[in-house]
Amino acid sequence: MEWSILQQYGPSLLKGFGNTVLCWALGTVFGMALGLVIALIQRYAPRWVTWIVQAYIEVIRGTPFLVQLFVLYYGGPLVGLRLDALPAGLLGLTIYGSPYFAEIFRSGFRAVPLGQIEAARAIGMSELNIVRRILLPLGLVSALPALVNFSIILTKETVILSIITVPELLYQVQRMSAETFRYLEANLVLALFFWGLVEAISRVGHRMEARITKHLIERT
Amino acid sequence: MLAASSVEIRKVNKYYGDFQALKDIDLSILPGKVTCLIGPSGSGKSTLLRCINFLEEYDSGEVRIDGQLIGYDAPGKRMPGRKLREMRRSIGMVFQQFNLWPHMTARENVAEGLIRVRGMSKSEAERRAAEALAKVGLADKMANHPSRLSGGQQQRVAIARAIAMEPKLMLFDEPTSALDPELVGEVLNVMKTLAGEGMTMVVVTHEMGFAAHVADQVVFMEKGELVGVDSPDRILHHPEDARIQSFLRTYHERNSF
């Protein structure tokens, strides 16, 4: 083992890690937002719209992220969509994650008892208020563990962005190992960075869960 | 004395696929009176009740609240959502499973409709909510979430949530069926108080004692049909129809020991 190379490559590794976290965070936030919109469309839109949305879900879930990125980055310019590597990567992550997030939100909404929605309808609440005040807060409680789980899966999907030259962590690690032939050290560093990130996300997730379920614990 | 609504139900039919849940129902509910719907489970009582505020869409016939058709602008033509919500504002509903919102305190549950539907300020809504909760005997439980309340307390919060909106008509869908026997009384007492104030009430219930003592009119339903409509005494003590006699016999057998 030769750890001294870390001194030399430390700054570029940290920069790569910074990009990884950035891509993950923004991709997750946008992917979740798009997923939420999709889940709401599926619940409220006319049937023909839900069919289109369902087709989108099937296509994105049915194809590898790698292929989607290639199509977006190298195929995009053919239809006038010319993006730099980082924005293309972000858009790719957003699209890739959205159908999974949509399904998680859908299951969360289904877990809200119909009676609680009917109670809101019975006093004359508008559907918009029902979504904001009842469906979302209650659906989120059941959806949160799965949302955190899929966000964790997404951290590791960010490495695929390296193939379209997004300078994220794997990209930097590959450069380092190609230049020094220290493949093992480089990849162990990569693993450590990801482990730390996932650990942090999981802790934040648990804390959020404890917070929003505080009042829902049944009296024993 | 409250402003109380009347309900006119004419030739109402309701289908679930091939199954006919309501068959040509005709019923008048007078303002300020208490009507109890009784009958075996699956007889269509709850379905009929839910047609009154259009939570259940009837397929044909008319349900009129104070003369105004609910759910439809004309036969077969659905009413716009805004207009339906407007009508529902003055119809309170209490459910078998309480259906309180678990992420809100008792007071927030009651204030929610006042803020979102009646457009009140938060402080005004909370003041009204406190009043409504005091009226059902829960002034000391306002800050509790539903998970920290007994079934009977939850149902009283649900009643407070409905009456805070100042409805002119209250619908109760088996309000005590999910409660432990010792908690039934506290809910029925609140309902009796409301009846005494002249609220129009339609109550689906298996509490024959409540029907006998509080109702002005008892309706017996079976298999989607209205079998009998009469005074509590005539239906519960001197029923002429064999189906009512058989239902009451079963009821008495089960409740005697």
Image (cartoon, grey):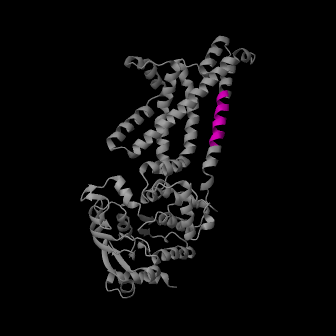
Left or right, A93 with reference to A46 = right
What residue lies at 63% left-to-right and 13% top-to-bottom? Answer: A178
- Up/down of A150 relative to A179, above or below: below
The answer to whether residue B20 shows anywhere in this view is no
What residue lies at 29% left-to-right and 58% top-to-bottom? Answer: B72
What residue lies at 56% left-to-right and 59% top-to-bottom? Answer: B126
The answer to whether residue B133 shows anywhere in this view is yes
Residue reaching furthest left?
A: B75
Front-most of residues B149 and A206:
B149
Q: Where's residue B193, x and y in %?
A: 50, 76
Number of numbered markers = 0
Front-most of residues B184 and B2:
B2
Q: Quadrant of the N terminus of chain B?
A: bottom left
Residue A195 inside the magenta-drawn segment = yes
- Up/down of A66 relative to B249, above or below: above
Residue reaching furthest bottom?
A: B238
* Magenta residues, start to end: A193-206
Quarter assignment of residue A7: top right
Left or right, B77 with reference to A10 = left
Quarter assignment of residue A5: top right
What residue lies at 41% left-to-right and 84% top-to-bottom? Answer: B249
Q: Where's residue A25, x and y in %?
A: 58, 31
- Up/down of B218 relative to B98, above or below: below
Q: Where's residue B105, x and y in %?
A: 58, 58
Q: Main secondary structure of the magenta part?
A: helix
Residue A166 inside the magenta-drawn segment = no
Q: Where's residue A65, x and y in %?
A: 48, 27
Front-most of residues A151 and B228:
B228
- Up/down of A196 relative to A216, above or below: above
